Amino acid sequence: MPSAQLKAPVSASNAAVDGFIASEPQLTTPGRPSFQSTPASTVRRLLLSLTAVSAFSGVFGIAPAVAAGAADALQATQISSLDSKAEAKLLEDAGSCGKLVRLAPGTEGQGIHLSIHGLGAAPADMEPLTQIAEKNGQATATFAYNTLHCDHRQNTQALASELTGWLAEHPGEKITVETHSMGGRMILGAIYHLQKAGEMPAQAIRLNMVAPPLAGFGLFNLCLAMPGPVARLIPGAAATRDMASLSGAQKQLDELQLPGNVKTTIYYGNDDGWIDYTTSGAARMASKLEAQVYYLAGPGHYEMVDAVARATPDQLSPTPLEYLPKARVERDPTQ
């Protein structure tokens, strides 16, 4: 794609999975934990949901939060340096659940660009989209936040606060926000807090969401049995718990009304084992957010950022493609 900010209108739709329990596809993304659902009692399904917490958050693959030399590896002007260890060190030093990291200064008048990664990922994973923004002369920043032990409220409040300060440095500049997966829930939560505080910016905002689970996951409702303080002790559990379709965080997103200056686009991959865009929840949230929705053939969940950054306009389908993970489940429930 010529630019991460496609020339088509950008809208945020919900790539949520209301029907996740019904389809429950097996995750087959290379390098990521996978699970396959099986008929089970409530207790066994709760254990499955906790396994999903670990799988979705990537806990098994995340290095210890505090590692020797992490601070030395951090280059504030290069997003590629912000891997999971550097992000954790940055947040530990800041004593915060979330911190906006300024990247390229950009050229005045070209706008500003914010990237927000998803659960089980790191700011560095947003580099393909950030690079395009930098080439376009935009001032860039990325949001580092704690997906292991902070919850939706803590992370989105931190983002709202950090965003207010950054926007004050760039008055009147048009804003582009690009997110992956749970990052979409982060920015909408921050908008909710900004509106409540009467601090919502009035300039044009382009919101591009890549594979966002905005309607939540029915499977994770089992995690709501865990009290919030307990969930925050389990790496990734609090953030995943807040993605349950019956969670308080989901209720907040359901109540959100985007102002007219926010234009949203959603990108789905038809081989994304996490995000089933054929569900009623996905359609409901896309309609609610008045999102323009595009579909890409081929990429899985963790390949979507790079796929969107590379996509040409002719590769973006405005009509839904066959959702392959669901089709595989329908053909062979054991696969």
Image: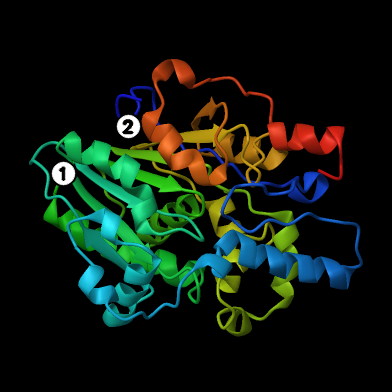
Residue neighbourhood size for the residue with mark 2, other residues' Cα within 10 Å, grouped as few (<14), some (14–19), many (≥20) = many
**Three-letter amino acid code at the position of disc 2:** Gln
In this rendering, the answer to whether 220 lies above or below 332 is below
In this rendering, the answer to whether 119 lies above or below 333 is below
**Three-letter amino acid code at the position of disc 1:** Gly
Q: Distance between the residues labelled 2 and 1?
A: 19 Å
Q: Which of 125 and 291 is in front in this view?
A: 125
Could you tell me residue 158's position as x and y percent?
A: 35, 69
| Label of residue 172 in the image | 1
Q: Which colour scheme is used?
A: rainbow
Q: In the rendered image, which quarter is residue 4 located in?
A: top left
Judged from the image, the secondary structure of the residue bearing numbered disc 1 is loop
The answer to whether one can see residue 247 in this image is: no
Q: Nearer the viewer, residue 66 or 215?
A: 66
Could you tell me residue 260's position as x and y percent?
A: 38, 37
The answer to whether one can see residue 173 in this image is: yes
In the image: residue 147, left or right of residue 248:
left
Task: Find the residue positioned furthest to the left.
Answer: 108
Classify the position of the N terminus by image quarter. top left
* 2 or 1: mark nearer the eye: 2
- Residue labelled with disc 2: 5
Classify the position of the C terminus by image quarter. top right
Judged from the image, the secondary structure of the residue bearing numbered disc 2 is loop
| Label of residue 104 in the image | none
Could you tell me residue 278's position as x and y percent?
A: 69, 34
First in residue order: circle 2 vs circle 1: 2
Q: In the rendered image, which quarter is residue 58 located in?
A: bottom right
* Residue visible at 44% across and 72% down in the picture: 154
